Image: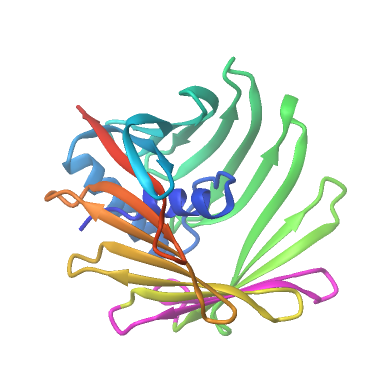
């Protein structure tokens, strides 16, 4: 069983071309998944993983022209300690540092410029169940940017995240719905809405009987389907394919994931709607 934590972060990065911060555990199930990922890294003694991006031209991968995409470093407890995001030519764009408590809960997530100046910092607080209950986001010079509060309604099987502006007014609300109990169920839907209840966007997740997500649908503020993702897994529970699909059910891209015999990721290749390769990535590892 390989960890899906890094793949999730990378997929968001590839899909939006904007880096996604590592998320804290919102439920006990989230915490268990994070522990599984951490133990995998620990057992394999992985010190770092680097994503190498190859030049692709007219659907052909040039193996001689490559550059760093980003690097993830791990501490000796198996937690992510640093991330390095690169621009063209292996030039560092920015880096992210992480700190943890004794239960391996992420306490802080800090973005640094190449000269080590702090760009942004997020601090988290947890309940007795090791699930996040609040966070504070700071910009440069620890200027408070926003706060988030996580509340659970066990009767409705809903978790609500409320974003608060520095002025103490609510910016938006996220409502996570679960199949069954919040702590053990699958997250079947997310609604983002304004303070007056107006829809901003909506996400619907579909799972198979094994608990694997097979489809993710993204809706706009008019509750109209914009696009969706379809997922395939192998017998080891590794994600092996993600298809991005238009609202007209046309495949836009296919992203295939490859693995080494020890279940670590080895490569990712993306093709467009005509099957032409548009992106080729490979993983390189160092070990303790």
Q: Quadrant of residue 123?
A: top right
Q: In the displayed structure, would residue 260 be above or below residue 113? A: below
Find residue 187 and report its horizontal and vertical position in percent. Answer: 48, 74
Q: Is residue 37 left or right of residue 27?
A: left
Q: Is residue 22 magenta?
A: no
Give the magenta part as a residue range.
181-210
Q: Is residue 240 visible?
A: yes
Residue at the image position 25 percent from the left and 42 percent from the top: 41
Q: Is residue 23 visible?
A: no
Asked which quadrant contains residue 173, the reply is: bottom right
Please tell me whether residue 237 is drawn above or below residue 131 in the rendered image.
below
The residue drawn where x is 76% and y is 63% is 172
Residue closest to the eye, 174 or 10: 10
Q: In which quadrant is the C terminus drawn?
A: top left
Q: Residue furthest top?
A: 115
Q: Position of residue 160 (x, y in %)?
A: 64, 69
Q: Quadrant of residue 154?
A: bottom right
For residue 189: magenta? Answer: yes
The residue shown at (58%, 31%) is 111
Residue 157, horizontal then vertical, whole percent = 54, 80
Instruction: Give the colouring mode of the picture.
Output: rainbow
How many marks are shown on the rendered structure?
Answer: 0
**Furthest-front residue in view?**
58
Specify whether 248 is left or right of 63: right
Residue 57 drawn at (x, y percent): 43, 43
In the rendered image, the vertical position of residue 93 relative to residue 16, given as above or below: above
Identify the image quadrant of the N terminus: bottom left
């Amino acid at each position: 069983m390989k960890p899906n934590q890094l793949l999730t972060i990378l997929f968001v990065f590839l899909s939006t071309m904007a880096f996604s911060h590592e998320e804290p555990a919102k439920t006990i199930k989230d915490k268990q998944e994070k522990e599984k990922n951490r133990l995998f890294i620990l057992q394999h003694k992985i010190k770092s993983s680097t994503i190498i991006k190859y030049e692709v031209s007219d659907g052909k991968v040039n193996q001689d022209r490559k550059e760093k995409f980003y690097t993830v470093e791990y501490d000796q407890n198996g937690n992510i300690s640093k991330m390095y995001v690169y621009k063209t030519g292996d030039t560092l764009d920015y880096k992210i540092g992480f700190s943890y408590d004794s239960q391996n809960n992420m306490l802080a997530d800090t973005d640094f410029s190449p000269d080590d100046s702090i760009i942004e910092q997020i601090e988290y607080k947890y309940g007795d169940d090791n699930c996040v209950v609040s966070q504070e986001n700071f910009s440069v010079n620890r200027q408070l940017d926003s706060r988030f509060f996580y509340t659970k309604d066990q009767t409705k099987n809903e978790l609500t995240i409320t974003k608060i502006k520095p002025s103490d007014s609510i910016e938006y609300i996220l409502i996570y719905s679960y199949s069954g109990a919040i702590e053990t169920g699958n997250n079947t839907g997310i609604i983002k809405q304004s303070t007056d209840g107006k829809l901003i966007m909506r996400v619907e997740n579909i799972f198979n009987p094994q608990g694997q997500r097979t489809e993710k649908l993204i809706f706009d503020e008019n509750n109209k389907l914009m696009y969706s993702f379809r997922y395939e897994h192998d017998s080891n529970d590794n994600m092996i394919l993600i298809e991005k699909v238009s609202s007209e059910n046309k495949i836009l891209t296919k992203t295939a994931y490859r693995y080494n015999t020890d279940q670590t990721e080895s490569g990712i290749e993306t093709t467009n709607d005509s099957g032409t390769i548009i992106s080729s990535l490979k993983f390189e590892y160092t070990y303790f």
